[in-house]
């Protein structure tokens, strides 16, 4: 029996009109325990405009000199370099207005197709392993078992089978140790974690089946409009299906909201803002430490060593 897409997806693009959310964000950072007689550097992720978010009135206020840089995957950041002596503890405030549009994929009904697929050489980079998402024999075996059980053949069918498997077998659970790193072996063995762990499995299994998949991370907003603090991050994924293009997926939200499991295969809601893409992130200019597992919070090196930094994010919806 062949894997069949839910009827919801067959009507998805034809009936839905993307929702749009407009809001203001303040993202503030302060060095912790900084000694003015020691050199330091800080990198802060900055939002970017794309097809699904428009950034306006971006302002950066700091008592230290900074520069804006762009690294791989189009990741934009503010970079501060401090050479001693420094009179005051450096701080930085990033504020911006954002208009985020719901990402609803338009070619999941099998009726419309791309005229031309993306360059295979470009797509190939999204088949490569990450440090915590290896594509080895065991991962290939587990992925193959999932798609075989679903009798999935096409890219879209295999991706849906993997998504169904992840949301049905992994619990959103941030207790204990090990969660939050996006370690595919931890997530597969413990069957729990947060968004990074869910998407480690989805991306790893998709790549193991020859389906390009990529990672993005940013800030979540409560669905209810208003204002307040944003306590953590959120991440999501996309996969590339031949003839269809890049398809949005949010497996952790699908697991947390069973009534919206169909929705989050093929959609990202408007309650988020993207800050960066990719894992094993190299900053600009490059940090002295190891590549970052992901880049959503400020990263600081003092005398070339990573140190903690304080941060606070607030948002306010616009009419």
Image: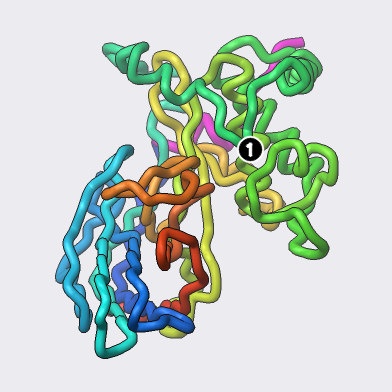
Seen at 48% across and 41% down, the residue is 280
Crowdedness near tag 1: few (<14), some (14–19) or many (≥20) residues, C-alpha within 10 Å: some
Colour style of the rendered protein structure:
rainbow
Q: In x, y percent, where is residue 162?
A: 68, 29
174 in magenta: no
User: Compared to 285, does 111 lie above or below?
Assistant: above
Q: In x, y percent, where is residue 139?
A: 73, 23
Report if residue 50 is visible in the image: yes
Task: Spot the residue most to the bottom.
Answer: 88
Assign a secondary structure to mark 1: loop
Lateral position of residue 48 relative to residue 16, left or right: left
Q: In x, y percent, where is residue 299?
A: 42, 62
Lateral position of residue 169 relative to residue 5, left or right: right
User: Compared to 153, does 92 lie above or below?
Assistant: below
Q: Quadrant of residue 298?
A: bottom left
Seen at 84% across and 39% down, the residue is 189
Report if residue 271 is visible in the image: no
Lateral position of residue 176 relative to residue 299, left or right: right
| Residue segment shown in magenta | 1-13
Q: Which residue is mark 1?
A: 132
Seen at 33% across and 70% down, the residue is 39
Out of 46 and 112, give the one closest to the viewer. Answer: 46
Out of 223 and 306, give the one closest to the viewer. Answer: 306
Q: In x, y percent, where is residue 196?
A: 61, 49
Q: Quadrant of the N terminus?
A: top right
User: Compared to 310, does 301 lie above or below?
Assistant: above
Out of 156 and 169, give the one closest to the viewer. Answer: 169
Q: Quadrant of residue 149?
A: top right
Q: Quadrant of the C terminus?
A: bottom left
Seen at 49% across and 62% down, the residue is 306
């Amino acid at each position: 029996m062949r894997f069949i897409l839910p009827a919801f997806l067959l009507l998805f693009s034809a009936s839905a009109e993307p929702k749009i959310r407009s809001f203001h964000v303040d993202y503030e950072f302060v060095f912790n325990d900084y000694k003015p007689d020691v050199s330091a550097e800080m990198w802060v992720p900055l939002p970017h405009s794309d097809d699904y978010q428009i950034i306006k009135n971006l302002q950066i206020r700091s008592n230290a000199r900074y520069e804006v840089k762009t690294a791989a995957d189009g990741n934009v950041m503010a970079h501060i370099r401090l050479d001693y002596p420094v009179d005051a503890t450096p701080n930085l405030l990033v504020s911006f207005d954002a208009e985020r549009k719901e990402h609803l994929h338009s070619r999941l009904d099998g009726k419309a197709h791309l005229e031309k697929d993306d360059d295979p050489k470009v797509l190939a980079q999204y088949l490569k392993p990450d440090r915590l998402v290896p594509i080895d024999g065991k991962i290939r075996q587990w992925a193959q078992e999932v798609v075989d059980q679903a009798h999935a053949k096409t890219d879209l069918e295999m991706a849906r089978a993997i998504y169904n498997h992840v949301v049905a077998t992994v619990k959103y659970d941030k207790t204990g140790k090990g969660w939050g790193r996006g370690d595919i072996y931890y997530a597969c063995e413990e069957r729990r974690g947060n968004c990074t762990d869910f998407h480690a499995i989805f991306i790893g299994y998709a790549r193991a089946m020859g389906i390009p998949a990529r990672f993005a991370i940013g800030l979540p907003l409560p669905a209810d409009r208003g204002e307040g603090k944003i306590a953590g991050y959120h991440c999501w994924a996309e996969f590339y299906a031949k003839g269809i293009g890049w398809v949005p997926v949010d497996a952790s939200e699908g697991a947390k909201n069973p009534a919206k499991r169909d929705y989050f295969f093929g959609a990202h809601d408007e309650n988020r803002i993207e800050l960066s893409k990719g894992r094993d992130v190299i900053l600009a200019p490059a940090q002295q430490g190891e590549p970052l597992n992901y880049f959503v919070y400020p990263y600081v090196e003092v005398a070339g060593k990573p140190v903690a930094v304080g941060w606070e994010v607030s948002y306010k919806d616009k009419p």
